[in-house]
């Protein structure tokens, strides 16, 4: 009798049969069906990474790029794969892994634009608290306590702030001189380290280049481009991304190259895709970049802590995925790079990701859902990417109730999960009903984003 995991493997294989090359590679790896993490890594994550990185390199070669900067930490496995392909296919592209994060770039830039700084520290997210907001500004524990004492507040420091209340927090911090003084001091102190590191990595050199990252909002490219402009770079920064839901205001779409979805199209791809899970599995075995230290003229990135359990899990994914990449490079062969059918494989990759991310098995939800994750600029306060939600908490995320709470028309807060589909399967009750509601919410969410993007493009023509 076929087990549940055997059935899962069979369904992945049915998807892979539509792309014979991917099927041959996965079949040759002989991954044990009972090893859930290895099955997903070989049958889903490897093919997706291979297709994406091949596309990046083909586009980079066509446009004359000579250097690619893979941004930590999402770019780590992309970088490893690119090194293998560049060596195998003798590509004239230099690949570099650069240790940057939203935090390590934003903190030094805060003193240049107070309004943008306030907007960023008061942005939404999963379980945003006053402590998180002040930590985003780089304040120490002692400084946070002084600011909290000066605010007119009804919320406790670690109480979740309802989304509709965040504008009020921003207004208060906009009037709080002590908060602004602390934030500006930390920002100015951090700028020399960022400037030295970016110069050291060659980002001011006159070489055709681009950055590579997972994507989502394009904020890293805008932020990094602004920082480089402050340091004297005159060329526009370009980027290659898995996907983008939106762009920063007034940014040029041609400078943002998307593989899987872009802001104005690909609705189906967005609905059944989970960017938080993507970040959790395609990650590096080190902590987030917090800043930079000058050690004898060499600028060294400072990393936050990362749990050993998480690092070992990520290394396990890396081993299987890199085996797939090596086999893919051999399968294509040195002369086959230009003919590698990256875009033709995208539909198969879409189906594989939809099954894993949007319709996970119970075993997959447990194994991958327990990965620690935080969507905030700083680590700390992580929860499982598929948080253990109750039936009531899952229902509170349904379309109508969620819209009313987020708009402020209904009181209360919503406990969210970074990977809601995984949380539904982990709960195990009324799975289909919860997933249907989530799909409806996703459709509405991304249709609104797409219309907003198209409207903004028309207005700024």
Image: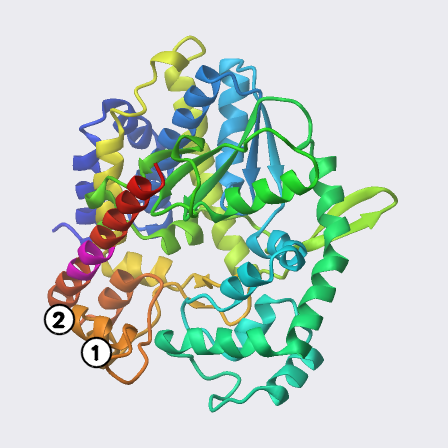
In this rendering, the answer to whether 89 lies above or below 115 is: above
Q: Is residue 221 left or right of residue 125?
A: right
- Mark seen at residue 430: 2
Badge 2: few (under 14), some or many (20 or more) residues near its Cα, within 10 Å? few
Magenta-tinted stretch: 440-445
Answer whether residue 441 is magenta in the image. Answer: yes
In this rendering, the answer to whether 225 lies above or below 162 is: above
Residue 378 seen in the current view = no
**SS for callout 1:** helix
Task: State the image coordinates of residue 242 (x, y, percent, origin top left).
Answer: 38, 39
Q: Earlier in the sequence, mark 1 or mark 2?
A: 1
Task: State the image coordinates of residue 98 (x, y, percent, origin top left).
Answer: 62, 40
The structure residue drawn at horizontal position 41% and vertical position 25%, both measured from the top left corner, is 54
- Mark seen at residue 25: none
Task: State the image coordinates of residue 180 (x, y, percent, origin top left).
Answer: 65, 71
Q: Which residue is mark 1?
A: 391
Could you give the CA–CA distance between mark 1 and mark 2, rounded to whole angstroms?
9 Å
The structure residue drawn at horizontal position 19% and vertical position 36%, both measured from the top left corner, is 15
Mark 1–mark 2 CB contact (< 8 Å): yes
């Amino acid at each position: 009798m076929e087990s549940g995991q055997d059935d899962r493997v069979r369904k992945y294989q049915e998807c892979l049969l539509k792309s014979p090359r991917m099927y041959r590679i996965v079949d040759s790896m002989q991954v044990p069906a009972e090893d859930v993490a290895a099955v997903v890594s070989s049958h889903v994550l490897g093919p997706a990474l291979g297709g994406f990185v091949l596309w990046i390199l083909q586009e980079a070669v066509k446009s004359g790029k000579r250097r690619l900067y893979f941004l930590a930490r999402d770019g780590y496995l992309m970088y490893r794969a690119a090194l293998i392909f560049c060596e195998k296919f003798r590509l004239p592209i230099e690949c570099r892994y650069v240790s940057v994060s939203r935090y390590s770039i934003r903190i030094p830039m805060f003193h240049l634009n107070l309004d943008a700084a306030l907007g960023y520290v008061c942005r939404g997210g999963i379980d945003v608290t006053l402590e998180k907001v002040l930590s985003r500004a780089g304040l120490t524990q002692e400084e946070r306590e002084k600011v909290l004492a000066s605010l007119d507040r009804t919320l406790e420091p670690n109480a979740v702030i309802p989304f509709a209340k965040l504008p009020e927090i921003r207004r208060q911090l906009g009037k709080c001189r002590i908060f602004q003084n602390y934030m500006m001091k930390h920002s100015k102190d951090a700028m020399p380290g960022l400037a030295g590191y970016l110069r050291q990595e060659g980002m001011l050199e006159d070489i055709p280049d681009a950055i590579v990252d997972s994507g989502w909002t394009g904020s890293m490219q805008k932020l990094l481009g602004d920082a480089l402009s402050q340091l004297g770079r005159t060329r526009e920064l370009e980027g290659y991304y898995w996907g983008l839901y939106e762009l920063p205001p007034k940014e040029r779409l041609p400078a943002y190259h998307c593989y899987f979805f872009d802001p104005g199209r690909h609705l189906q791809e967005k609905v059944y895709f989970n960017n938080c899970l993507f970040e959790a599995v395609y990650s590096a075995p080190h902590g987030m970049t917090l800043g930079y230290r000058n050690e004898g003229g060499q600028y060294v990135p400072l990393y936050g802590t990362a749990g050993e359990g998480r690092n070992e899990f990520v290394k396990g994914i890396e081993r299987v995925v890199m085996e797939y990449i090596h086999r893919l490079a051999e399968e294509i062969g040195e002369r086959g790079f230009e003919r590698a059918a990256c875009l033709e494989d995208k539909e198969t990759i879409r189906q594989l990701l939809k099954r894993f991310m949007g319709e996970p098995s119970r075993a997959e939800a447990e194994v991958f859902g327990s990965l620690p994750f935080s969507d905030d600029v700083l680590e700390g306060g992580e929860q499982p990417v598929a948080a253990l939600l109750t039936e009531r908490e899952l229902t509170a995320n349904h379309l109508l109730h969620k819209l009313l709470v987020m708009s402020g028309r209904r009181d209360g807060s919503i406990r969210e999960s970074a990977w809601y589909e995984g949380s539904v399967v982990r709960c195990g009750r009324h799975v289909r009903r919860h997933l249907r509601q989530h799909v409806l919410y996703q459709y509405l969410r991304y249709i609104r984003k797409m219309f907003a993007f198209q409207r903004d493009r028309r207005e700024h023509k």
